[in-house]
C-alpha cells in the first residue's frame, strides 16, 4: 500500500527518538507568573537579517526593537532601508529560491537590571526570499514569550505569502520594510466550566419551580377536558333512547 | 415445497442462534495473552506427587502459578510496578508461599493451590537482606527475615511476629545472610569487608543471643556471592584471589580452615568469579554435605564435605548449567552440557555419589532464533519403580521458558519477552500465490506478444489448479465434523484476507527479541533474538517497503540506539518471515540524533531512511545513486527538526544538496521555568476525508490540516501546587512558527497527548481541583480556505483559529491513542487505557470545543452535544469487556481494508488485540442478514411482474378481439 501524501510541498517526517525527561529543579528566585510591578523604561535589541546566495548566515542589522517590559510588554521597531546593493542581492537570492532569515537575541522581558535581560544565543526564523520580494517587503513579525517573560521564539510571514514568480520591476518597492510587529504571551487555557454549568442547571430547576403548570399531575392539568368529555358522554347517552339502539342492532 | 419448508425451518433455527450473538462474539475477533515477565524465582510444587504447578516470581513484580502440562496460568498476582512491588524473596513450604515484597516492607503468604492470600503483614522499615524458613524437630513453623539492623521471626500460620531483635554492631557489620539448620537456632551472618565475619546465633524460642563470635576473614567482602552453608553447619566460602576454599564450623570452631584449590587439583578460569551452590531440601534439616562449585563459564564440580575434608565426586566439564533437585529422599543434580551446535544434553547425577543415573538423558534443542540457556529449573519425581524421573524448565537469555520432558519433547514454551513490548508495527500480509503470480505478470518487463500470451495462459492454469485444490479442500473438510476443522496458521499459508483484517504484528521487546504475530489468532509465527542489546536501548521500527511491491520482499528496519552513548545500529529484516535481509545496513560510527523515513522511494520501492548524526551530517539508507540523485533534487523541500530537552531547544534544519544541513529556525524554551516532556507530530499514514465541518447555517468551517504541526508539551520545574503549570505549544515543524501557546495553570503531569487531524487532546492532573482533566484544542482555518489544492507550511500567512475546551475525567489514565481508518471517513474515537485494565473507546464527539453551553437551533442542527463539564465513563464503552489488560503501556492502531474497522493492539504486561467500529459496521452486512428473504422477495416480485405483464397482454388482446 503506497502511502498517499496529500500535501507534498514541504515534506517533513520526523520520528522522535527519545525524550530526556530529567527533572531539573531550578528556582532562581523568580516565580512563575509573577510579574514585576515596576514600570521600566525599556531597552532595545537589534533585529538582524541575513540573505546570502550560499545560504550561510551573515547577519546584518536590519533595525532595532524597542522592548518595554512589564505586565503587558510592548514592542516597537525602527528599521533601516535596504541599500541598493542589498536589494540586488535579495533579488538574486530570490531568483535561486534562497532563504531570508531574521534573528533576535534571547532576552528576558521582566528583568529589572540591564545585565539580566540578555542571555546567550539567538532565536531565528526564516521566510523564502522570493516571498519577501514579491510581497514588496511587507512582513509580519511576531515575538513569543513564555509565562515568565522570556522570549522563546520569533516568527515571520509575508503577506501575501506565495511565490508566483512575478517580477518586481520597481526598485523602490524593495526599499522600505512594511512591517507589522506584535508580541504574544501565552494564553490561559480554560479549565472545565463547572460554575456556568451549575448555574444553568440551577436556572433550569428554578424555571421548573416557577412554572407550577408543568409539575401538576395529569388529572390536575386536564381535569376540564376529562370533565367535559364525561358530560358529553352522559348527555349523548341520555339523549339516545336505549330502545332505538336495540332496534338498530336487530 | 418440501424444500421451502426446510428453508423456513432452517431460517427459524438460524434466528434462534442469533439471539445470543454478542456472547458468541467473545473471542471471535479478539484475543488476549497474559504474561508474567522474566523469571527471578521458581519453585515446583512438590508436596503432592500429582501436582502440576510451578510457582514463578518475576522481575515484573508478578507472582504466578503455571500449569506444567500446558504452560497456562493457574493464577497470577500483579503487584505495583517499581521497587515498591519488587519481590525480594520467595519461601515455599508445603501449601504456602511466603513472599518478601518491596525491599522488606511487606510479608505475604499465598495459598498456592488457589492463589488466595493467607495473610499479609507490614514489616518495620529497613533494607531487606535475606530470609529463610526456620524448622525445628522436623517441622517448619517460622520464617526469619534479616534486615539491615534487625532480625525478626514470624509464624508461618498467621504471619505474627514471634520476636524481633536488634543485630549487634549493625553500624559496622553488614549482615547479609541468615541460616537455620533445624536445631533450634537461627544464625545471622555478617561481614566487615576485608576484616572479619560476624556470626550471631539466636534461639528460635525467644530470640535470645546464644552465641556471638567473629572470625578473621580479610579476603571476604560479600557472603551471598562467595559463601554457602553446607552439611553440619559448615560455612564454606570460595575466594578467587587466594584460590582457596575456606570452611568454618558455625557450631564449634573459631577458626577458618583453608583448603587450597590446588590441593584438590582444581583451577579457576581467569576473570571468573567462582561461587558455591548448596542445597537444603528440607528447612528443618541440615543442608546436604554435597555442593556445587562453579569454577568457569562451563566448568562445574560436585564436591562433598566430609569431616572437614573436601572430596571431588564429579567434575562436569563442559557443563553449561547445573541444578539440584530433590524428590522424596533422593537428591539429584541435573547437568546441561553442550552436545553440538544445535543441541544440549541434560543428564541426572546422583548427588550422593556423583554417579550418572541410567536412562536420564534429555536432549534440549537450542532454538537458533532464541538466546542461550541461562537457568535450569528441574522438577524431579519418583517413578513407579522408585527411580528418579524429571522434567526441566529451561530459561534462556531472551526470557523464554521451555518446559521439556524426556527424551526431549517440548511440552510448552512461553515467550516472556512479550511482557515488555517496546514498539510495534502492523504489516499487511502478502498476497496469495495466485494473486502474486498475476501481480508478477504485470510487474515483469514485457517481452513480445507470444511470450506474454504464454505467461498469461500459464498463470491462468495455475489459478485453475489452485481453485480446484480449494474446492477439493472444501469438499474434504465438509465431511469432517466441524470441531476438527482447524485453520492452522503457519508461515506457509499466510495470505491477505478479503478485507485485510489479518495482519502481521511485528513486536520489538526490551530483551531484544523480535516477534511476528498473526493478528487474527495471536500465534507467534516467527521470532528473532538480537544479541547484545543494551539495557537502556531505544527502539525505532520503520516499515521501509510494504508488501505492495511484489516481487520485492517487504522490508522493515529497526534502529536500536543506546540512550547513553547515542550510538545506534540497524537491523534490516523481512517482517513476514522474520529473516534478516540481504541488504547490508550502513555501519553507524557517529551517535544518531534523528531518523526520518521519507516518502521518496528508490528504484526497488524502498522508502529512504535519513539518519542525522551529531555532526548534523545526513546519511541515507539505502544510499544508491538513484536515491542520492532524488535527494539532491528534493533537498530544498526536506526539513526536519531536532529536540534537545535538556537545553529546551527546538531547532529546524533544511537539507542541502550536498547532504549537509543548515539550521533554519530555533526556538528556545528556558529550562529554568519549564522543560519539554513530549513532542507529538501526526501519524504519516493518517487520512482526513472531510476538509471542513458543515455548520448549522449550511456554511463550512474549514479545518486547519497542517501535516507538519507539532504539539509540544512542557511541564513547569516549579512543582508547588499553586504555581505548577503545563504548557502547550503548537509549532510548525518546517518554519518554526508558533501558532498557539497556552498554559494550563495549577496543573501537573504526567501528560498524555494525542495529536491528529486538526485537534490535540491532552490529559493532565489538576492540582487545584485534585482531579484528572481532559482538554481539547481544535484548529480551524475559518470560513474560507487559503489554498485548497496544496498545503505548504511556507505559504500559509494566516494563523489558524484556535478553540479549546476542558472536561473532568473521573479516572487517571495509562495511555491514550486515536483510532485510525483507511480513508478517514469513519468518525474518530479515543482509545484510553485505564490503570484498572480496561480499554475505553471514547467518541471524539464528546471532546469537541464547539460543544455549546446554551443549546441553540444551529447547534442542534450540527448535532453538537450540549456542554457538560464531566465526561462519564460508560461501561459499554469498554472494548475489552472482562479481558483486563494489566499495566497497559501502549495502544497501537492500524487501519484495515474495511473503512469502518480499525485494528487495535494494547500491550503492557498482557497483549490484547481486537477490532473497533467507531461508526458501527456501516459497510458490512450483519451476520444474520436475511439473504434468503431478500432474494425470495426479489424473485417473487420479478415473477409477479412477469405474470401480470402476461395477463395484461392477454387482457389487451381480448379487448381488441371484442
Image (spheres, rainbow, N blue to C red):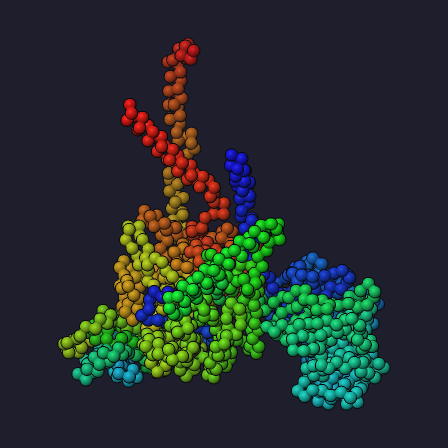
Tell me the quarter of the picture where residue B745 sits: bottom left
| Identity of the residue furthest to the right in this view | B307
The residue at the point 34 percent across, 62 percent down is: B779
Instruction: Compare residues A120 and B11 and report the one nearer the observer.
Output: B11
Question: Where residue B928 sits: x, y (%)?
Answer: 49, 45
Give the image location of residue A76, x and y in percent: 24, 74
Query: From this viewpoint, is residue B162 visible?
Result: no
The quarter of the image holding the N terminus of chain A is bottom left
Image vertical order of residue B697 relative to residue B204, above or below = above
Task: Give the answer, above or below, for where A42 lies relative to B920.
Answer: below
Q: Residue at x 49, y 53 (%)?
A: B877
Task: Residue B476: tell me if it is visible.
Answer: yes
Q: Who is closer to the viewer here, A184 or B501? A: B501
Above or below A223: residue B567:
below
Residue B425 horizontal side relative to residue B633, left or right: right
Residue displayed at 66% across by 87% down:
B271
Q: Nearer the viewer, residue A60 or B599?
A: B599
Amino acid at each position: 500500500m503506497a502511502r498517499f501524501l496529500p500535501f507534498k510541498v514541504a515534506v517533513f517526517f520526523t520520528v522522535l527518538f527519545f525524550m530526556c525527561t530529567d527533572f531539573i529543579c531550578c528556582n532562581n528566585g523568580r516565580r512563575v507568573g509573577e510579574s514585576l510591578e515596576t514600570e521600566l523604561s525599556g531597552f532595545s535589541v537589534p533585529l538582524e537579517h541575513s540573505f546570502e546566495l550560499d545560504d550561510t548566515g551573515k547577519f546584518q542589522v536590519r533595525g532595532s526593537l524597542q522592548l518595554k517590559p512589564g505586565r503587558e510588554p510592548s514592542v516597537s521597531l525602527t528599521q533601516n532601508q535596504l541599500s541598493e546593493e542589498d536589494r540586488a542581492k535579495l533579488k538574486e537570492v530570490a531568483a535561486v529560491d534562497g532563504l531570508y532569515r531574521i534573528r533576535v537575541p534571547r532576552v528576558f522581558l521582566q528583568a529589572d537590571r540591564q545585565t539580566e535581560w540578555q542571555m546567550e544565543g539567538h532565536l531565528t526564523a526564516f521566510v523564502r526570499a522570493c516571498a519577501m520580494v514579491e510581497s514588496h517587503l511587507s512582513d509580519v513579525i511576531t515575538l513569543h514569550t513564555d509565562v515568565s517573560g522570556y522570549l522563546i521564539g520569533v516568527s515571520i510571514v509575508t503577506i501575501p505569502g506565495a511565490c508566483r514568480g512575478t517580477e518586481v520591476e520597481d526598485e523602490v518597492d524593495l526599499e522600505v520594510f512594511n512591517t507589522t510587529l506584535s508580541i504574544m504571551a501565552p494564553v490561559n487555557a480554560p479549565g472545565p466550566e463547572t460554575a456556568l454549568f451549575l448555574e444553568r442547571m440551577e436556572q433550569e430547576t428554578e424555571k421548573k419551580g416557577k412554572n407550577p403548570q408543568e409539575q401538576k399531575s395529569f388529572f390536575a392539568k386536564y381535569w376540564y377536558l376529562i370533565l367535559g368529555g364525561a358530560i358529553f358522554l352522559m348527555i349523548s347517552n341520555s339523549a339516545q333512547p336505549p330502545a332505538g339502539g336495540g332496534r338498530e342492532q336487530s | 415445497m418440501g424444500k421451502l419448508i426446510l428453508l423456513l425451518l432452517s431460517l427459524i433455527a438460524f434466528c434462534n442462534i442469533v439471539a445470543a450473538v454478542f456472547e458468541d462474539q467473545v473471542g471471535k475477533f479478539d484475543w488476549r495473552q497474559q504474561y508474567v515477565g522474566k523469571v527471578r524465582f521458581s519453585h515446583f510444587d512438590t508436596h503432592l506427587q500429582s501436582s502440576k504447578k510451578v510457582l514463578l516470581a518475576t522481575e515484573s513484580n508478578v507472582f504466578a502459578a503455571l500449569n506444567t502440562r500446558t504452560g497456562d496460568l493457574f493464577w497470577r498476582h500483579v503487584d505495583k510496578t517499581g521497587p515498591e512491588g519488587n519481590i525480594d524473596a520467595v519461601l515455599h513450604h508445603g501449601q504456602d508461599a511466603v513472599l518478601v515484597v518491596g525491599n522488606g516492607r511487606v510479608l505475604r503468604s499465598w495459598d498456592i493451590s488457589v492463589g488466595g492470600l493467607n495473610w499479609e503483614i507490614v514489616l518495620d522499615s529497613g533494607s531487606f537482606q535475606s530470609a529463610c524458613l526456620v524448622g525445628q524437630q522436623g517441622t517448619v513453623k517460622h520464617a526469619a527475615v534479616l534486615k539491615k539492623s534487625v532480625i525478626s521471626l514470624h509464624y508461618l500460620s498467621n504471619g505474627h511476629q514471634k520476636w524481633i531483635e536488634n543485630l549487634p554492631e549493625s553500624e559496622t557489620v553488614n549482615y547479609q545472610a541468615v541460616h537455620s539448620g533445624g536445631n533450634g537456632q537461627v544464625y545471622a551472618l555478617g561481614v566487615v569487608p576485608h576484616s572479619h565475619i560476624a556470626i550471631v546465633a539466636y534461639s528460635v524460642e525467644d530470640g535470645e543471643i546464644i552465641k556471638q563470635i567473629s572470625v578473621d576473614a580479610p579476603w571476604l567482602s560479600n557472603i551471598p556471592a562467595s559463601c554457602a552453608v553446607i552439611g553440619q553447619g559448615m560455612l564454606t566460602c570460595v575466594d578467587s584471589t587466594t584460590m582457596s576454599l575456606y570452611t568454618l564450623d558455625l557450631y564449634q570452631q573459631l577458626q577458618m580452615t583453608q583448603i587450597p584449590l590446588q590441593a584438590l587439583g582444581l583451577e579457576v578460569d581467569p576473570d571468573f568469579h567462582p561461587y558455591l551452590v548448596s542445597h537444603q531440601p528440607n528447612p528443618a534439616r541440615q543442608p546436604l554435605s554435597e555442593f556445587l562449585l562453579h569454577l568457569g563459564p562451563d566448568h562445574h564440580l560436585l564436591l562433598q564435605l566430609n569431616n572437614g575434608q573436601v572430596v571431588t565426586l564429579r567434575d562436569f566439564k563442559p557443563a553449561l548449567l547445573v541444578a539440584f533437585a530433590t524428590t522424596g529422599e533422593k537428591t539429584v543434580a541435573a547437568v546441561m552440557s553442550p552436545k553440538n551446535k544445535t543441541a544440549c544434553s541434560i543428564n541426572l547425577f546422583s548427588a550422593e555419589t556423583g554417579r550418572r543415573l541410567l536412562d536420564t538423558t534429555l536432549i534440549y534443542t537450542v532454538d537458533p532464533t532464541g538466546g542461550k540457556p541461562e537457568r535450569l529449573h528441574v522438577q524431579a519425581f519418583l517413578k513407579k519403580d522408585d527411580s528418579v524421573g524429571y522434567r526441566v524448565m529451561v530459561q534462556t537469555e531472551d526470557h523464554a521458558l521451555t518446559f521439556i520432558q524426556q527424551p526431549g519433547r517440548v511440552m510448552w514454551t512461553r515467550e516472556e519477552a512479550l511482557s515488555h513490548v517496546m514498539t510495534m508495527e502492523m504489516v499487511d500480509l502478502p498476497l496469495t500465490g495466485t494473486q502474486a503470480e498475476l501481480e508478477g505478470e504485470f510487474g515483469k518487463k514485457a517481452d513480445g506478444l507470444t511470450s506474454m500470451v504464454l505467461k498469461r495462459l500459464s498463470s491462468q492454469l495455475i489459478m485453475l489448479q489452485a481453485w480446484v485444490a480449494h474446492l477439493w479442500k472444501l469438499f474434504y473438510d465438509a465431511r469432517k465434523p466441524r470441531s476438527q476443522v482447524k485453520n492452522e496458521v503457519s508461515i506457509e499459508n499466510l495470505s491477505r484476507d478479503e478485507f485485510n483484517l489479518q495482519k502481521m504484528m511485528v513486536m520489538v521487546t526490551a530483551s531484544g527479541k523480535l516477534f511476528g504475530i498473526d493478528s487474527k489468532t495471536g500465534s507467534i509465527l516467527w521470532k528473532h533474538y538480537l544479541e547484545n542489546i543494551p539495557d537502556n536501548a531505544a527502539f525505532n521500527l520503520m516499515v521501509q517497503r510494504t508488501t505492495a511491491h511484489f516481487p520485492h520482499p517487504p522490508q522493515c528496519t529497526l534502529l536500536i540506539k543506546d540512550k547513553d552513548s547515542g550510538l545506534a545500529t540497524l537491523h534490516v529484516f523481512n517482517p513476514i518471515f522474520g529473516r534478516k535481509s540481504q541488504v547490508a545496513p550502513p555501519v553507524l560510527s557517529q551517535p544518531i540524533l534523528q531518523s526520518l523515513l521519507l516518502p521518496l522511494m528508490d528504484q526497488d520501492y524502498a522508502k529512504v531512511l535519513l539518519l542525522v548524526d551529531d555532526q548534523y551530517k545526513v546519511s541515507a539508507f539505502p544510499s544508491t545513486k538513484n536515491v542520492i540523485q532524488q535527494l539532491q533534487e528534493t533537498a530544498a523541500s526536506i526539513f526536519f527538526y531536532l529536540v534537545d530537552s535538556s537545553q529546551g531547544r527546538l531547532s529546524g534544519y533544511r537539507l542541502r544538496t550536498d547532504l549537509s544541513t543548515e539550521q533554519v529556525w530555533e526556538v528556545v524554551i528556558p529550562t529554568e521555568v519549564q522543560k519539554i516532556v513530549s513532542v507529538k507530530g501526526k501519524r504519516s499514514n493518517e487520512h482526513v476525508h472531510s476538509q471542513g465541518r458543515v455548520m448549522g447555517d449550511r456554511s463550512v468551517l474549514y479545518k486547519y490540516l497542517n501535516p507538519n504541526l507539532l504539539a509540544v508539551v512542557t511541564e513547569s520545574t516549579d512543582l508547588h501546587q499553586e504555581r505548577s503549570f503545563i504548557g502547550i505549544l503548537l509549532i510548525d515543524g518546517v518554519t518554526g512558527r508558533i501558532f498557539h501557546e497556552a498554559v494550563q495553570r495549577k496543573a501537573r503531569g504526567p501528560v498524555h497527548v494525542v495529536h491528529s487531524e486538526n485537534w490535540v487532546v491532552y490529559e493532565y492532573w489538576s492540582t487545584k481541583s485534585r482531579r484528572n482533566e481532559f482538554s481539547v484544542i481544535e484548529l480551524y482555518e475559518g470560513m474560507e480556505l487559503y489554498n485548497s489544492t496544496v498545503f505548504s507550511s511556507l505559504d500559509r500567512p494566516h494563523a489558524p483559529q484556535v478553540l479549546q475546551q476542558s472536561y473532568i475525567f473521573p479516572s487517571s489514565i495509562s495511555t491514550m491513542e486515536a483510532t485510525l481508518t483507511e480513508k478517514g471517513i469513519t468518525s474518530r474515537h479515543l482509545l484510553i487505557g485505564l490503570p484498572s485494565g480496561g480499554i475505553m473507546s471514547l467518541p471524539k464527539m464528546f471532546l469537541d470545543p464547539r460543544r455549546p453551553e446554551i443549546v441553540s437551533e444551529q447547534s442542534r442542527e450540527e448535532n453538537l452535544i450540549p456542554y457538560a463539564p464531566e465526561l462519564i465513563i460508560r461501561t459499554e464503552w469498554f472494548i475489552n469487556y472482562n479481558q483486563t489488560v494489566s499495566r497497559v503501556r501502549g495502544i497501537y492502531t492500524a487501519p484495515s481494508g474495511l473503512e469502518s474497522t480499525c485494528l487495535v493492539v494494547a500491550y503492557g504486561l498482557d497483549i490484547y488485540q481486537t477490532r473497533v467500529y467507531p461508526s458501527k459496521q456501516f459497510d458490512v452486512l450483519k451476520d444474520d442478514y436475511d439473504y434468503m428473504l431478500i432474494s425470495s422477495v426479489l424473485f417473487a416480485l420479478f415473477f409477479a411482474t412477469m405474470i401480470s405483464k402476461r395477463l395484461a397482454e392477454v387482457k389487451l388482446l381480448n379487448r381488441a378481439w371484442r
